């Protein structure tokens, strides 16, 4: 690098920098540009696979992607539920968290994406039918929810658990699942959707960073949210950060809700990726 020999410190980042420099000098396509093209191509293939499915089934989805020439690596838990998957194109592998719009192709959101695609197709088909023949198509989940609501409203004889008060039904938050691989380990992070939206929106990349990317900062914030403080610190330091590592006792407050905690994790992750004051020796 600039006439000097690199040691093994941050060798992965340095190798990427060297490759990009050679690409620039020779007028080749930069790796990041090719990566974005591949992600767009795979995303389109995933959407087409979902469009071709009459009913949602992950095994069918996987088979259709393989038929299109892609490799699919699926990770399941002990009961067989799909926790994560990645798609291979050539020598490159892309996690489902990188695909789609706002992680719409991750295992936790894949069924909802399929339902939306086919709902949109149904609405489009209705516009081709004469007005008198139009029908309203709803998903089975929405119909079931509506029937349940009507039953609850029309059941005055049902007695509450306590004579003087009725217990309201608590709506469970929609959860977003992230799989973060770091240093040979996999960290599973489940975060409420609203908190995830806040965290992704508030996470920004500091100026004058060494090798940090926005994804690195987001992963740091997610790990902090799930209380993987050591892993979050390792990521920030490996990218040349460490300017504002979590101090002893830093963590979630007892009265802190998910949204406020997500804001704090995003701010802390930003500080952790600020360039360290000491020099880097090449």
Image (tube, grey):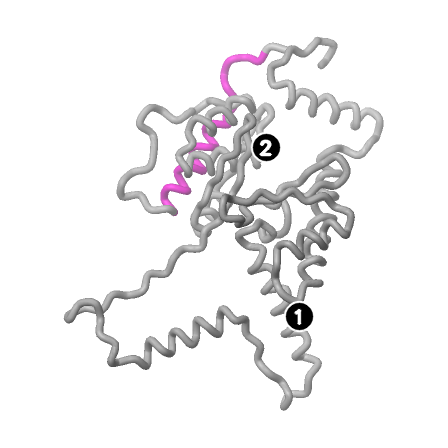
Q: Secondary structure at mark 1?
A: helix
Residue tagged 2: 213
The foreground one among 257 and 55 is: 55
In this view, the residue farthest toward the bottom is 132
Taking 177 as reference, is 218 above or below it? above
Q: Which residues are magenta?
A: 259-280
For the point 52% across and 37% down, the residue is 218
Asked if residue 269 is among those painted magenta in the image, a careful observer would answer yes
- Residue 141 placement, left or right of 65: left
Quadrant showing the N terminus = top right
Residue tagged 1: 121
In terms of image quadrants, where is residue 17? top right
Coordinates of residue 61 in the picture (x, y in percent) = 66, 55
Coordinates of residue 280 in the picture (x, y in percent) = 57, 13
In terms of image quadrants, where is residue 38? top right
Disc marking residue 104: none
* Image marks 1 and 2: residues in contact by CB distance under 8 Å: no
- Residue 250 placement, left or right of 277: left
Taking 139 as reference, is 62 above or below it? above
Q: Nearer the viewer, mark 1 or mark 2?
A: 1
């Amino acid at each position: 690098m600039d006439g000097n020999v690199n040691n093994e410190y941050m060798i992965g980042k340095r190798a990427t920098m060297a490759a990009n420099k050679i690409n620039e000098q020779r007028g080749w396509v930069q790796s990041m540009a090719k990566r974005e093209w591949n992600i767009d191509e795979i995303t389109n293939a995933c959407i087409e696979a979902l469009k071709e499915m009459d009913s949602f089934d992950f095994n069918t989805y996987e088979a259709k992607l393989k038929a299109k020439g892609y490799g699919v690596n699926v990770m399941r838990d002990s009961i067989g539920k799909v926790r994560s998957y990645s798609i291979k194109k050539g020598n490159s592998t892309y996690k489902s968290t990188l695909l789609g719009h706002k992680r719409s192709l991750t295992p936790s959101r894949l069924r909802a994406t399929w339902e939306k695609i086919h709902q949109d197709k149904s609405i489009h088909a209705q516009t081709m039918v004469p007005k008198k023949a139009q029908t309203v198509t709803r998903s089975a989940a929405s119909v079931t929810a509506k029937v349940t609501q009507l039953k609850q409203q029309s059941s005055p004889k049902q007695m509450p658990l306590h004579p003087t008060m009725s217990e309201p039904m608590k709506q469970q938050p929609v959860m977003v699942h992230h799989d973060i691989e770091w240093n040979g380990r996999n960290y599973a992070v489940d975060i409420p959707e609203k908190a995830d939206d806040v965290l992704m929106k508030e996470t920004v990349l500091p100026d004058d960073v060494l090798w940090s990317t926005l994804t690195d900062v987001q992963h740091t914030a997610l790990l902090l949210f799930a209380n993987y403080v050591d892993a979050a610190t390792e990521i920030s330091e490996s990218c040349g950060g460490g300017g504002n590592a979590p101090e002893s006792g830093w963590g979630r407050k007892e009265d802190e809700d998910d949204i406020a905690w997500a804001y704090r994790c995003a701010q802390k992750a930003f500080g952790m990726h600020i360039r360290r004051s000491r020099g880097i020796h090449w």
